[in-house]
Image: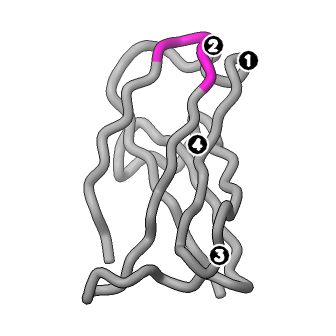
């Protein structure tokens, strides 16, 4: 299920954000065996990726994943509003 999350990031800083993935009934989504990817783009229609976020499964049974970006990557993102997505594949 899609969800809106707003992240604030200063250029040249590290980002770390926990996502708790849940099923429609609120119980944790077991993501054992799933792979994830995440990217930042300027708009929904942009074919160019501005940057990629690293996604690490922190707790597969509990549905917890960690999004990270290091300061070297964020230093190259121009100021502005961007969209990001997290995609899961089983």
Q: Is residue 28 left or right of residue 66?
A: left
Task: Quadrant for residue 16, please give it.
Answer: top right
**Mark 4 or mark 1: which is in front?**
1
Element at badge 2? loop
Lower position in the chain sequence, tag 4 or tag 1 = 4
- Residue 61 is situated, as x and y percent measured from the top left of the image, at 61, 81
Main SS, magenta region, reads loop
Q: Is residue 9 magenta?
A: no
Quadrant for the N terminus in the image: bottom left
**Mark 3 or mark 4: which is in front?**
3
Disc ID at residue 49: 4
Instruction: Give the magenta-colored segment's residue range.
Output: 10-14
Lower position in the chain sequence, tag 3 or tag 4 = 4
Residue at mark 2: 75
Residue at mark 3: 60
Distance between mark 3 and mark 4 Cα atoms: 27 Å
Distance between mark 4 and mark 1 Cα atoms: 16 Å
- Residue 31 is situated, as x and y percent measured from the top left of the image, at 61, 81
């Amino acid at each position: 299920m899609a969800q809106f999350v707003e992240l604030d990031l200063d250029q040249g800083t590290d980002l770390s954000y926990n996502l708790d993935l849940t099923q429609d009934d609120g119980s944790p989504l077991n993501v054992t065996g799933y792979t994830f990817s995440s990217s930042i783009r300027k708009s929904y229609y942009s074919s160019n990726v501005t940057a990629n976020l690293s996604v690490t499964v922190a707790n597969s049974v509990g549905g917890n994943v960690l999004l990270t970006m290091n300061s070297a990557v964020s230093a190259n993102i121009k100021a502005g509003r961007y969209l990001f997505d997290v995609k899961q594949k089983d």
